[in-house]
Image (cartoon, grey):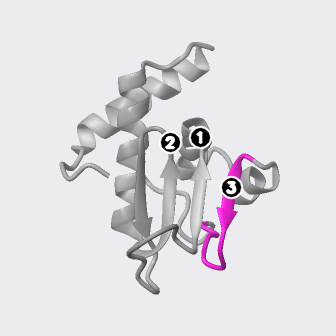
């Protein structure tokens, strides 16, 4: 995660642009997609602070969240990874976590890697 916080207006605008592009069947602008992903990761970090689960959305960002044992070196024991489109869908509630996970679009390992209790977010 970048140390600079994404302003709520900029985050929502980027998310709106990504949604607009998806609805029109277009590919979203990379900058809008990156900002939307990072903004939603930022909201997740605010909602569920901690260091026990690493959520990765390559190539745009990663954040450690959820209270529990702190991870400091090597591969974290609890990792969640997904593509940007899946992250935006589960983070905003347009797709349920369980549906995305069962379809194989979410890679989740570890006993704490279920985000259904903290999703969706309210952007």
Most foreground residue, 16 or 76: 76
Q: Residue furthest front?
A: 74
Mark 2 lies on residue: 58
**Lower sequence index among marks 3 and 1:** 1
Query: Which numbered circle lies on residue 107?
Result: 3
Query: Which numbered circle lies on residue 83?
Result: 1
Judge left or right: residue 53 versus residue 23: left
The percent coordinates of residue 70 (x first, y second) are 40, 82
**Rendered residue at 37%/44% (across/down):** 38
**Rendered residue at 36%/30% (across/down):** 14
**Span highlighted in magenta in the image:** 105-115
Q: CA distance from mark 2 to mark 1?
A: 6 Å
Instruction: Answer whether residue 106 is magenta in the image.
Output: yes
The percent coordinates of residue 37 (x first, y second) are 43, 41
| 115 lies above or below 28 | below
Badge 2 vs badge 1, beta-carbon distance below 8 Å: yes
């Amino acid at each position: 995660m970048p140390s600079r916080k994404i302003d709520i207006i900029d985050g929502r605008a980027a998310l709106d642009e990504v949604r607009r592009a998806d609805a029109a069947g277009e590919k979203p602008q990379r900058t809008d997609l990156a900002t939307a992903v990072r903004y939603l990761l930022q909201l997740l970090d605010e909602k569920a602070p901690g260091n026990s689960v690493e959520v990765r959305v390559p190539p745009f960002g990663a954040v450690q969240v959820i209270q529990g044992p702190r991870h400091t070196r090597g591969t974290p024991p609890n990792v969640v990874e997904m593509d940007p489109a899946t992250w935006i869908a589960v983070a905003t509630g347009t797709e349920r976590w369980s549906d995305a996970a069962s379809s194989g679009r979410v890679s989740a390992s570890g006993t704490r890697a279920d985000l259904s209790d903290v999703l969706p977010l309210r952007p």
